[in-house]
Image (spheres, rainbow, N blue to C red):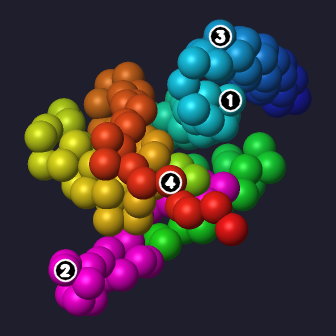
Amino acid sequence: MGTIIKITKIKRIIVQTTSSSHESQKSQCKQMVNEQYKYSALTSKIIGCAMTVHKSLGNGFQEVIYQRALEIEMRLAGINFKREFEMPIYYREYRIGTRRVDFLVEEVISVEIKATTKLDDTNFAQAINYLEAYNLEIGMLINFGEMSLNFKRLTNKKFRPPPES
């Protein structure tokens, strides 16, 4: 009986610590919002979700595990998205294949997930290629494989605004 009481108390402490750190994380995300960047509030929400996942799971899992966990967090945060969103790739107006971005958020931000010890140029090239191929202005590259969550906000320099109707 005494041991059960101690475990219960420990669980309460852990839960309280987790919820207070979640509040701290929300506060950090509010500080990350910079209105000079397009979709800053939305990218900050995505980063907050990713931080929650990384804090809970740490590093060392396969990419698909982080995708599934981030999917849950973004749903809980009320973020609209499509997972494994497939789009055609064109070359000189010929369809030459398809690619899948890990998440297409609110139809305006691509989110590419990695679980590697360090991001390299090929990871950035892939994320930028998705932005260009999908004609999206903003993207994110999030790496769960490092000791601390690593995230990059990317801008498509070749973005073409859609014609107004």
Q: Position of residue 1 (x, y in %)?
A: 87, 29
Residue 161's mark?
A: 4
Are discs 2 and 1 less than 8 Å apart at CB? Answer: no
In depth, the one of 135 and 109 nearer the eye is 135
**The residue tagged with tag 2: helix, strand or loop?**
loop
In the rendering, at what x and y percent does residue 73 appear?
Answer: 67, 47
The residue singled out by tag 3 in the image is 31
Q: Are marks 3 and 4 in contact (CB under 8 Å)?
A: no
Q: Residue under circle 1?
A: 41
Q: Is residue 16 left or right of residue 119?
A: right
Real-space Cα distance between discs 2 and 1? 36 Å
Give the Cα distance between marks 3 and 4: 29 Å
Q: Nearer the viewer, mark 3 or mark 4?
A: 4
Magenta stretch, overall SS: strand
Pick the residue in front: 3 or 14.
Answer: 14
Position of residue 120 measured from the top left corner of the image (x, y, whole percent): 13, 38
Residue 127 showing in the rendered view: no
| Furthest residue in direction left, as rendered | 121
Which comes sooner in the sequence, label 3 or label 4? 3
Task: Classify the position of the C terminus by image quarter.
Answer: bottom right
Sooner in the amino-acid sequence: mark 3 or mark 2: 3
> Mark 2 highlights which residue?
92
Tag in front: 2 or 1: 2
Residue neighbourhood size for the residue with mark 1, other residues' Cα within 10 Å, grouped as few (<14), some (14–19), many (≥20)? some
Mark 2 surroundings within 10 Å by alpha-carbon count, few (fewer than 14), some (14 through 19), many (20 or more): few
